[in-house]
Image: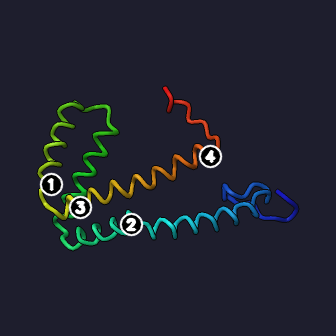
């Protein structure tokens, strides 16, 4: 550490050498957040999320479905074919409700915006993922 400067666990502070760059990055990140919040996809997602939130039982069902979906995708100890088949059936039942259908569609659209931003960052920074082109 430099002279009398206190040690920190902040990963962005490496002997004080990137502090000025982090300020610029934080400012640009704040600008990106503002732009995202102004997007149609974000606004649509927020509206759909609010409508779903107005029905706590329905919201709980949607979140339980999403949790099971996540667990199945990240578990190696399941019969994937049967589980996905069941999730697909359950999804087809849930989206019969127009509030759920709109929420899920809005969520997917918003996630695609975030994915596009992430891919542009990775590509623009020459960050080697390695397995992407396999």
Q: CA distance from mark 2 to mark 1?
A: 24 Å
Q: Secondary structure at mark 4?
A: helix
Which mark, residue 40?
2
Label 3 environment density (alpha carbons within 10 Å; few <14, some 14–19, many ≥20) = some
| Number of the front mark, 4 or 1 | 4
Q: State which tag comes first along the sequence, 2 or 4.
A: 2
Q: Residue at x 51, y 67 (%)?
A: 35
Q: Mark 4 and 1 residues: CB-CB less than 8 Å, in contact?
A: no
Question: Residue at label 3?
Answer: 102
Q: Mark 2 and 1 residues: CB-CB less than 8 Å, in contact?
A: no
Label 2 environment density (alpha carbons within 10 Å; few <14, some 14–19, many ≥20) = few
Q: Secondary structure at mark 1?
A: helix
User: Of 17 and 35, which appears nearest the observer?
Assistant: 35
Which mark, residue 63?
none
Q: Secondary structure at mark 3?
A: helix
Question: Residue at label 1?
Answer: 94
Asked where in the image residue 3 lies, by quadrant, the reply is bottom right
Q: State which tag comes first along the sequence, 2 or 3.
A: 2
Q: CA distance from mark 2 to mark 3?
A: 14 Å
User: Of 49 and 66, which appears nearest the observer?
Assistant: 49
Q: CA distance from mark 2 to mark 4?
A: 25 Å
Q: Residue at x 60, y 36 (%)?
A: 128
Which mark, residue 124?
4
Q: Residue at x 14, y 47 (%)?
A: 90
| Number of the front mark, 2 or 1 | 2
């Amino acid at each position: 550490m430099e002279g009398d400067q206190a040690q920190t666990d902040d990963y962005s502070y490496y002997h004080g050498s990137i502090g000025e760059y982090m300020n610029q990055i934080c400012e640009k990140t704040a600008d990106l957040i503002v732009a995202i919040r102004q997007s149609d996809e974000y606004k649509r997602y927020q509206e759909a999320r609010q409508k779903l939130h107005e029905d706590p039982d329905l919201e709980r069902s949607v979140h339980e479905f999403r949790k099971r979906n996540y667990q199945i995708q990240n578990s190696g100890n399941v019969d994937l074919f049967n589980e996905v088949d069941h999730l697909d059936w359950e999804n087809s039942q849930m989206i019969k409700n127009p509030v759920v259908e709109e929420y899920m569609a809005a969520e997917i659209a918003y996630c695609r915006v975030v994915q596009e931003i992430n891919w542009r960052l990775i590509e623009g920074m020459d960050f080697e993922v390695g397995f992407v082109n396999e």
